[in-house]
Amino acid sequence: MVTDYPFLMQAMAWPLALLVAWFLGERLYEAWRVPRVTSYVAVGLVGSLINLPGLTDAVPGLPFLANVALSLVLFELGYRINLRWFRHNPWVLVLGLLESVLTFVLVYYASSWFGLATDMRLIIAALSVSASPAGIVRVANEMRSTGQVTERVLHLCAINCMVSVLLLKLVVGYWHLNQSGDLVGAVLGSVHVLLASFLAGAVLGVLMPWLLRRQKTSERGVTVVFALSVVLLTTMTYGLRISPLVAALAFGIVARERRVHLTNAQRGFGTAGDLLSVFLFVYIASLLDWSEVGSGMRLALLLILVRAASKVACNVAAARLSGSTERKGVLAGLALTPMSVFTIVLLEQTRSLGFAPATEVLTVMAAMMLLQELLGPLVTQRSLMAAAETHVTKE
């Protein structure tokens, strides 16, 4: 038998990269409390230098696996959303919506200083609205963070993600309108994707709890069922060419309302969730092109500053109205810093559906993605620690 050594080396590259990322993450977390996801991103960035994504031809299905990993996180984020909180404290919902709109407007106008085309500016502004559920949820779980700032950050993150997807779909519809001149088709296409995605997740969120109530299942078994349901949902949405991210978030929100509980021990979906988390951050970081980072650094620094200022200012302004303090408003705004994982996966999905500008946008935003994903989790961690809501002792 002849061994295909090039294929073997390509196939081994990803497991080796994930092992290195895991060991580095554990070491730096134990020594200096560096968020594990930051270490995973660092390994992915090194992987991008040696063209780790170029080896994906030997390991097909990695984009789908990344979507499954992020969908699990979005399900968990949705599962932690309490819709009753919005009814009792509507200012949190208003804050999330107003802050999303303000961020979109400010980033759109700030990006005009660099001579970018209107389509490009609209896409960048829509993406900048989002916060990274992967970074925020993993850091919150890692630090066992609970409290007002933590819950507010999680709820605002969910609102930001939903609004970001909505805005991006509208921008894509606008682009298709310019290309085809079909206004009805462009609008209906965007609305159809969002509604179908949300409906798919909501249906599964009703069906799974109903089935679980008719079958005696351990807490561990409940977690397995939900994990398999997320995989099913991701596969289905891929086939229907709708958004697995919106569907997973809707699934979590509706499942929470149906009163099926996951234990704290199963947060993050246990060992399988940890493995997929390592892969997700390494894979996403490896997609960034270092050759584009230097040229976009001035744009990145400006947009990061504008985005952070918008989120902090809105949280401070609405702090008293929403039952918080100005200090907690600052910390909540800063904790929303991460954005890259959700943004890059969303861009990759959009590109796969035939949206040509998506590739160019990722090139323009490469420096912003690098800084946000490498340093964002650290900002989130320190913000939650400053709020005295973390419960991790020195091991």
Image (cartoon, grey):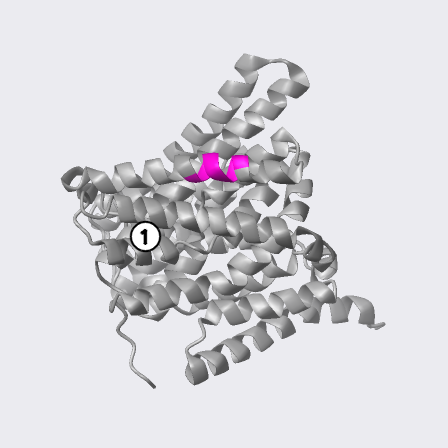
State the image coordinates of residue 150 (x, y, percent, origin top left).
28, 58
For the question of whether residue 247 can be seen, the reply is no
35 lies left or right of 369: left
For the question of whether residue 109 can be seen, the reply is yes
State the image coordinates of residue 328 (x, y, percent, origin top left).
25, 57
Assign the C terminus to one quadrant of the image. Answer: bottom left
7 lies left or right of 62: right
Q: What predominant SS class does the magenta segment belong to?
A: helix
Q: Nearer the viewer, residue 262 or 379?
A: 379
Outermost residue to the front: 113
State the image coordinates of residue 94 (x, y, percent, origin top left).
27, 36
In the image, residue 234 sits, relative to residue 163, either above or below, namely: below
Q: Secondary structure at mark 1?
A: helix
Residue occupying image coordinates x 61% and y 70%: 43
Rendering quarter of residue 52: bottom right
Assign the N terminus to one quadrant of the image. Answer: bottom right
Outermost residue to the right: 2
Task: Specify the segment rendered in magenta.
Answer: 103-109
What count of labels does the image hold? 1
Rendering quarter of residue 140: bottom left
Magenta region includes residue 375: no
Residue occupying image coordinates x 39% and y 39%: 100
Provide the residue designation for mark 1. Answer: 154
324 lies left or right of 175: left
State the image coordinates of residue 278 (x, y, percent, origin top left).
52, 67
Rendering quarter of residue 250: top left
Amino acid type shown at disc 1:
Leu
In the image, residue 173 sits, relative to residue 216, either above or below, namely: above
Label 1 CA crowd tier, 10 Å (few <14, some 14–19, many 20+) = many
91 lies left or right of 186: left
